[in-house]
Image (spheres, helix red, strand yellow):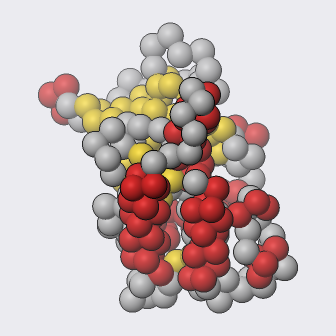
Amino acid sequence: MAGTTTLAPAPGDETVANRRRAAGGRYILGELLGRGGMAEVFAGRALGSLGFQKPVAIKRLLPSLAQDEEFVGRLVDEAKLLVGLSHANVISVLDLVRESDDVFLVMEFVDGPSLRQLLGAYASTNRGPLPLPLVAYIVQSACAGLEYAHARPTGAIIHADVSPSNLLLTTTGEVKVADFGIARREGIATAVEGKWAYMPPEQAAGAPLSNKSDEFALGVCLYEL
């Protein structure tokens, strides 16, 4: 965890809730990409020496939750689960920062749409469903990422929120499983969270989850596609 990093708003960005700009800030916030009940995600840049810049995604707790230790703990838990994951089909975590009112994850940036956005684009042009070979490729790639998470030597990590919104597509054709915000270890029961349309029965009942729980949700995605 960085100790002296402060988010610096991009010049002219009025959507950034953080109103401070640090002269030596290592990250700059850019465009708001999305907002959920717990966090918001921005495009951003990591700043280095000699003008070095790297595109990143910054997942930041909503300002109203930044002082709530329960939500801070959940973001930290997400980072701890993800930091050991290194796979082409899983979003990687690069940094975790807590300083003053800022709590955020710095993650790999994906330069393409979510599967949900792709489906919407197809529907808006009346092109019908996605081509079957593309569907098979997307789901197979997601399977590879989830299988990797499920096969961790330290215990399976269950995503618990697989849906088209959390499958990201790069412009070079890669598929990334994203948003492990409610992920948990196999066999652990917690409060019922996730998207009802993709939720397996055991998750809806608040029972412990297994790799089959993610397989169920991905199967719903496949049916939708």
Residue at 66 percent of width and 38 percent of height: 35
Dividing the picture into quadrants, the one containing residue 76 is: bottom right
* Residue positioned most to the top: 12
Residue at 67 percent of width and 83 percent of height: 209
Report if residue 67 is visible in the image. Answer: no
Name the image quarter holding the C terminus. bottom right
How many numbered marks does the figure carry?
A: 0
Residue 160 position, x and y percent, is: 64, 69
Figure check: 21 above or below 81: above
Residue 87 position, x and y percent, is: 32, 66
Residue 201 position, x and y percent, is: 78, 78
Residue 17 position, x and y percent, is: 64, 27
Say left or right for 219 vs 28.
right
Figure check: 130 above or below 136: above
Figure check: 28 above or below 182: above
Front in this rendered view, residue 84 or 131: 131
Residue at 60 percent of width and 83 percent of height: 212
Figure check: 7 above or below 37: above
Residue at 60 percent of width and 69 percent of height: 219
* Residue positioned most to the right: 205
